[in-house]
Image (cartoon, helix red, strand yellow):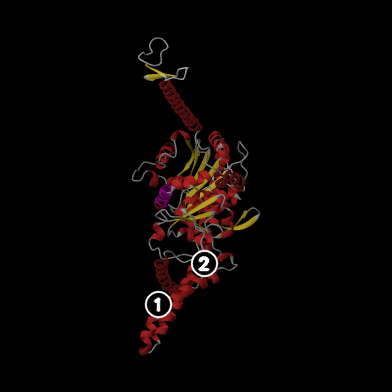
Amino acid sequence: MKAEKLAAGQSPWEHQLWDALGPVANVYKSLMAQLSPSTFPKTLVGLNVLALTDRIERVRHGKPQSRQRNTESTDSLSRGQDNLLETLRYMRMATAAYGRVALNPGSKAAITQSNFAQLLCEHLRGDLAVDQVEVPLLSMRARWLLPAHYLLVDKHRREVVVAVRGTLSVHDVLTDLGAEEVDLVLGGKARKAHKNMLQSACNVLRVIYPVLQRISDVDTITFTGHSLGGGVAAYLTMLFLEMELPSADGSIHVQCFTFGSPGICPAAVSRSLEDRIVSYCHAQDVVPRLSAGHLLELHGRAVLAASLTSDVVRRLVSQDPAALWRAVRTIPQDLQEAFSKSTIEPERQITGDSPELLKLYPAGRCFLVQTDGEVEELDPEDLAPCIYLSGGHRLVVDHLPKTYENAIQAAVKRAQDLGSTTELSRSRLDLFYLGFKLRGLLKLISLGGCGLWWLFDVVRIGCAPSYALHFRVTNDLPHWVFVLVLVLLFGGGGLVYSLSSYARYRKLKTAEAGKMHGEDIAMDRPDGGQPVRFNSSFGYSGYGATLS
C-alpha cells in the first residue's frame, strides 16, 4: 500500500486534502441531482418572498410559527445537568479554543502551552485557579480534518475538559461543507452522521486518547465546542460512550456542552442523548438549523412561494378595470394563503424515506437562549423545523461566540434575580430535584423529620459528594469551608445561648434578693396582733457579700 502511494506521487498532505474535498464534491453532486437549474430564477424570487413572509409572521406572532413547543423558564434549567453557571463556564472554555482572537485580542504574542493556562484562568474570571490547572495538550493550528483543540485537567474538580475550536480557517470551512451523510453505528444501530465532522472527531480522539490514558484521579470528562467545534465535541461524546476507559472508582461520567452546533444527527438520536449532551442555540443563529435536508426544504419552499405569488399577480392582471380594485383588496389574503402553503406543503414533500433528504439536528437537550437571557427548552424538531429568513444579518451575527457568551451571561443574571425564591423552593424539595421521589415525599410529609432530616442533610452534604439518580451533582463545596462554617455556627450559637442563660439567671437572683431584702421588712406576730415593722438600715459587706 505504501509503495503504491509513493509510486502515484501522492503525499500524506494531499491524501488528507482529498479526504476533506471528497465529501464536499459528493454533497454538491447530490444537491445538483435533486435541484433543476431551470428553477433557480424562481428560487431567487421565492427566497425574497419567504424573507418577507417570515418577517411579517415574526411581527404578528413575535416568532416564526411552528409546532407546539415544550417551554421552560430560566430557573428550571437546573433540573438536569446543565445549570447556567456551568454552561457559562464551558462556553468560555469553548471560546478560549479560538486562541489569541478570544484570549488576547490585539496582541501579537503567540499562544503557547506555557502561557495558555494563565490566559484561560483570566478569561474564566476566577472559575479556575492556575495552580489547580494543567494543559497537557494544546493544538491551536487546524489541519485537514483535524480542528484546533486543547485538553485541560482541573485537579480541584477532578475533571478533564476537551474543547474544540469552531470555524476559523480554510481547513475548517472544508470540514463544514463536507456534509455527506454516512452511517455511524451507535448501540448496534446505524445512524446518519456528517462525514467530515465525524472524521474530524475520530482524528481528535486518536490524539487525545493516549493523553487521557496517562491521567489519573478523574471523575468527569467534558467535551465542549462552538460551531464546528460543537459538532465535533458531540461526535467525540458518542464515540467515547462506545469505549471503556477504567478509572479509580470504576466509572467516568462523560458529558458534552455545545454552542451553535450544526445539525449532526437525526431527531431520534438527538433525543436519545439528552442525558449526556446539551446544545444551545442563540436567537436567530442559522447554523443549528442547517443540514442538507433543510437546504432542500428551503429550495422547495422558495420555488412554491414564487409559483403561488406569480399566480396571484397573474390573476390581478387578468381582472377587468372595474373589478381591479376589489381584486387588489384581496391581495393580502391571497398572499397569506400562498405563504402558508409554501410553509406546509414542502414539508410533506421533503420528509421522504430517501437518506439524501434527511434532516439533521443538534444533539441532546436543545435550548434556545435569547439575547435578553430568556431560555426555553425545545424539541430538536421544534428548534430547527426549517430555515427562517426573517433574521436578516442576525442569522450570522447571532452565531458569533461572543454573542453566545453575552446571551448566556444575561441568562445567568436573569436567573440570579429569581434566585431567592428558587433556592427556597429547592431547599424544601431537594430530593425531588435529585430524582429521589419516594424519599422526597416522606421528607415532605414528615416536615423534614421534625428537623432531624435537616441535620442529617447538613452532615451528608458537607462530608461527602451528593449523588443524584440520573445526573451528577457538582461537588463544589470544599470540605474545609464546611468544617469552618459548622464550627463557627455551632460555636457562636453555643456562646450566644450561654450568655443569654447567664443573663437570665442573674436577673432571677437579683429579683429574689429584692424580695427578701427590701427597705422595710415585715414580720407577723405569733399572737395575731399587728405585724412589727422595722427599717432595714444595715447593709451587707465584707467577704461573701452579694448586695451592697
* Residues at marks 2 and 1 touching, judged by CB atoms closer than 8 Å: no
**Residue pushed farthest top?**
543
Question: Considering only vertical position in the picture, is 486 above or below 316?
Answer: above
CA distance for labels 2 and 1: 34 Å
Q: Is residue 141 visible?
A: no
- Return the residue at label 1: 332
Task: Determine whether the residue tagged by mark 2 lies in a helix, strand or loop.
Answer: helix
- Residue 474 within the segment the image draws in magenta: no
Which residue in the rendered view is the most extreme toward the left? 106
Determine the secondary structure under disc 1.
helix
Q: Residue furthest right?
A: 188
Q: Quarter holding the C terminus?
A: top left
Q: Is residue 491 left or right of residue 327?
A: right
- Mark 1 neighbour density, 10 Å: few (under 14) some (14–19) many (20 or more): few
Look at discs 2 and 1 and give the one toward the viewer: 1
Q: Quadrant of residue 392?
A: bottom left
Q: Which mark is residue 31?
A: 2
Q: Please name the predominant secondary structure of the magenta segment in the image.
A: helix
Q: Is residue 123 visible?
A: yes
Compared with 320, 194 (above or below) is above
First-in-chain label (2 vs 1) = 2
Q: Position of residue 337 (x, y in %)?
A: 46, 76
When asked about the image quadrant of residue 182, the answer is bottom right
Residue pictured at 46% horizontal, 66% vertical: 65
